[in-house]
């Protein structure tokens, strides 16, 4: 058949530039000329910036090999398709945590259970493999869990039954070999949560009031279990003792290991990205998404406080109570009759004593290339102006503090040095409601609700009003400064004294968070854009990416469900005939076949 006159490529390109991306793919199937033009790099660069509304000053992802594939990555590889709903919990689901291998995950709930789930079934579905109730230990509910580095132990954090303003909690360690309980550790306030320092040691907290508005937070290092061979070895050691003023306390501890700070998965500094590309010269990069690969007085205080709380709990029985929100305030609330002048004098005196009796900080300077490879930071929320957590505190953990063996920290200090100082503080100027580390521990992502600009806090018990919009800050732990602008899209509605933690999670390329507006959200870390909203019937408390496959995401909600989300690409692969899903190995084989199958993607009509 004789063909008519052929339009110049430049004219075809001008026409394609005025079409939406899906129309470009369809008309590209018309003939070879149009197919070639429909894959033009200039065309897809324009479609990319226009469709995703990204400023032209933002460069392409440093690992992307073409604009076409980058468009497809953001369009087709986001876990936004609901494939399964897990309904085994009978109350609000508060937290989700994956194992480091990605083969299991745990969930915590108001039903006072911690459940373990298997993600490697041959049929691709997720199923529950174990459930432990903590009600026998007088817990009100479980709130947080974390796998240790080799996935052999599970840390579970919970809240005791008690009065509405009770702040006491406990940490339990469960063996994942036989699901036996290995140890239990006091944790106060409960929203310290606790975390692993290494495979065998975990960090917990305690709180002692030394005035109406002044307290002391003690962070403890605990061995997860006691071996028979080590009966005479310490199983607990005090790490830090920090003074709190204006009713603030230390909460939400986590550990950042700095070994990969000079070789992160993704640099968020565009100028640093360009410099890294120049240093690598002509070395080719593969697109990231398509290369997934396979102490005596303290103990006495605890016993005394524990006895009082046990009496209160015994009187209350096993009644269901609402979730406490701001911890550690029961002492302050009981002393609200104290005058404002007296409280101001107390704070002034406490600060004077703190300056005179606090150990000098270990100065943390922004790291130069090659420095800081062995540094380990303890991160936590704190404050100095009000009880609302509005600062990120950083303490350097020294090598001799990594174990409970040896002398207790503090023996080398002067008798006048009662407290440890913070090594670095980052003020967020708002109420912090969530934190999460990138997989390489280079970046800290922080959910906060901002205070009004220029506000002045005159009463520590009356913090400024907080915004409904949640800001997702990004802090570079190498330079110790905030990167770029905050991410936005999600919202929260509770006031200061009812704020609760909304857990977020970070994968290599994405960051996700829950919200009070009944949705989870996913952003691209490089482009700073919101890519998906994940619907629930109530508040979304937690989200979690699989470390083995960032195209698998979980979300937990007050609607008592856990939803499983996969990318459109993975859903198509599962539904393809005679191609059953095999965990991760299927993805590897598809990637190998995909290298030389550009035309196959055109048939589907997707980027």
Image (tube, rainbow, N blue to C red):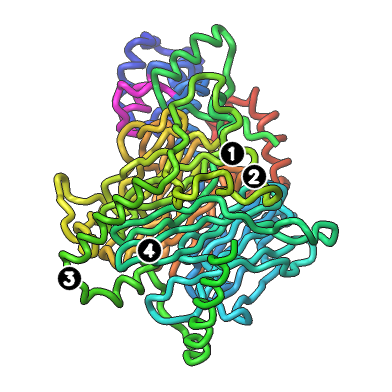
**Residue 327 at what x, y percent from top left?**
39, 67
Q: CA distance from mark 2 to mark 3?
A: 44 Å
The secondary structure type at the circle numbered 1 is: loop
Q: CA distance from mark 3 to mark 1?
A: 42 Å
Q: Which residue is mark 2?
A: 402
Q: Which residue is mark 3?
A: 339
Q: Which residue is mark 4?
A: 500
Q: CA distance from mark 4 to mark 2?
A: 31 Å
Instruction: Identify which residue is drawn at 46% across, 65% down.
Output: 189
Q: Closer to the N terminus: mark 4 or mark 2?
A: 2
Q: Closer to the N terminus: mark 2 or mark 3?
A: 3
**Residue 477 at what x, y percent from top left?**
46, 34
Q: Are marks 2 and 1 in contact (CB under 8 Å)?
A: yes
Q: Closer to the N terminus: mark 4 or mark 3?
A: 3
Is 59 within the magenta? yes
The secondary structure type at the circle numbered 3 is: loop
Q: Characterize the local packing of mark 3: few (<14), some (14-19) or many (20 or more) Cα atoms within 10 angstroms.
A: few
Above or below, 42 against 103 in this view is above
Q: Closer to the N terminus: mark 4 or mark 1?
A: 1
Instruction: State the extent of the magenta-drawn residues as a range.
Output: 43-60
Is 251 within the magenta? no
Q: Which residue is mark 1?
A: 398
The secondary structure type at the circle numbered 2 is: loop
Q: CA distance from mark 4 to mark 1?
A: 32 Å
Return the residue nearer the eye: 575 or 190.
190
Name the mark nearer the viewer: 4 or 2: 2
Name the mark nearer the viewer: 3 or 1: 3
């Amino acid at each position: 058949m004789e063909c008519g006159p052929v339009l110049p490529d430049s004219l075809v390109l001008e026409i394609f530039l005025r079409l939406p991306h899906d129309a470009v793919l369809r008309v590209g199937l018309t003939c070879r000329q149009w197919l070639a033009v429909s894959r033009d790099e200039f065309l897809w660069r324009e479609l990319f910036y226009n469709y995703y509304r990204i400023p032209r000053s933002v460069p392409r992802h440093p690992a992307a090999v073409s604009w076409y594939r980058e468009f497809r990555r953001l369009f087709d590889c986001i876990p936004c398709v609901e494939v399964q709903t897990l309904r085994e919990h009978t109350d609000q689901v508060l937290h989700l945590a994956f194992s480091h291998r990605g083969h299991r995950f745990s969930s915590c709930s108001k039903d006072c259970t911690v459940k373990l789930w298997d993600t490697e079934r041959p049929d691709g579905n997720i199923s529950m493999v174990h459930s432990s109730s903590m009600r026998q230990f007088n817990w009100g509910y479980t709130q947080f869990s974390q796998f240790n580095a080799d996935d052999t132990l599970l840390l579970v954090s919970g809240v005791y039954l008690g009065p509405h303003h009770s702040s006491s909690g406990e940490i339990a360690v469960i063996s994942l070999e036989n699901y036996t309980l290995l140890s239990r550790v006091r944790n106060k306030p409960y929203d310290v949560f606790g975390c692993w320092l290494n495979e065998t040691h975990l960090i917990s907290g305690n709180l002692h009031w030394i005035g109406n508005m002044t307290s002391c937070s003690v962070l403890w290092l605990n061995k997860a279990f006691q071996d028979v061979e080590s009966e005479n070895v310490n199983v607990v050691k005090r790490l830090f003792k920090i003074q709190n003023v204006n009713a603030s306390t230390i909460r939400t501890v986590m550990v950042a290991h700095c070994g990969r700070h000079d070789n992160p998965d993704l640099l968020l500094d565009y100028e640093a990205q360009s410099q890294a590309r120049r240093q690598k010269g002509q070395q080719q990069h593969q697109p990231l998404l398509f290369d997934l690969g396979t102490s005596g007085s303290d103990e006495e205080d605890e016993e005394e406080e524990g006895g009082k709380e046990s009496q209160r709990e015994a009187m209350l029985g096993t009644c269901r109570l609402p979730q406490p929100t701001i911890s550690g305030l029961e002492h302050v609330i009981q002393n609200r009759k104290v005058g404002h002048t007296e409280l101001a004098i107390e704070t002034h005196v406490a600060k004077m004593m703190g300056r005179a009796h606090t150990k000098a900080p270990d100065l943390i300077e922004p790291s130069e290339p090659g420095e800081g490879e062995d540094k380990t930071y303890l991160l936590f929320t704190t404050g100095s102006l009000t009880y609302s957590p509005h600062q990120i505190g950083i303490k350097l953990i020294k090598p001799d503090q990594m174990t409970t063996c040896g002398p207790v920290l503090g023996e080398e200090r002067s008798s006048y040095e009662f407290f440890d100082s913070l090594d670095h503080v980052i003020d967020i100027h708002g109420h912090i409601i969530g934190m999460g580390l990138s997989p390489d521990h280079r970046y800290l992502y922080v959910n906060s609700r901002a205070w009004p600009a220029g506000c002045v806090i005159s009463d520590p018990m009356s913090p400024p009003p907080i915004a409904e919009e949640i800001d997702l800050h990004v802090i570079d732990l190498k330079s110790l400064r905030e990167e770029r602008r905050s991410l936005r899209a999600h919202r929260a509605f509770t006031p200061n004294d009812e704020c609760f933690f909304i857990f977020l999670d970070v994968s290599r390329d994405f960051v996700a968070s829950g919200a009070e507006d009944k949705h989870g959200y996913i952003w691209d870390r490089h482009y700073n854009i919101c890519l998906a909203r994940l619907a629930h019937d109530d508040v979304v408390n937690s989200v979690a990416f699989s470390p083995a496959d960032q195209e698998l995401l979980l979300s937990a909600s007050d609607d008592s469900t856990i939803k499983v989300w996969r990318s459109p690409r993975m859903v198509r692969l599962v539904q393809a005939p005679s191609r059953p899903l095999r965990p991760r190995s299927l993805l590897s084989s598809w990637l190998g076949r995909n290298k030389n199958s550009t035309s196959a993607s055109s048939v589907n009509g997707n980027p």
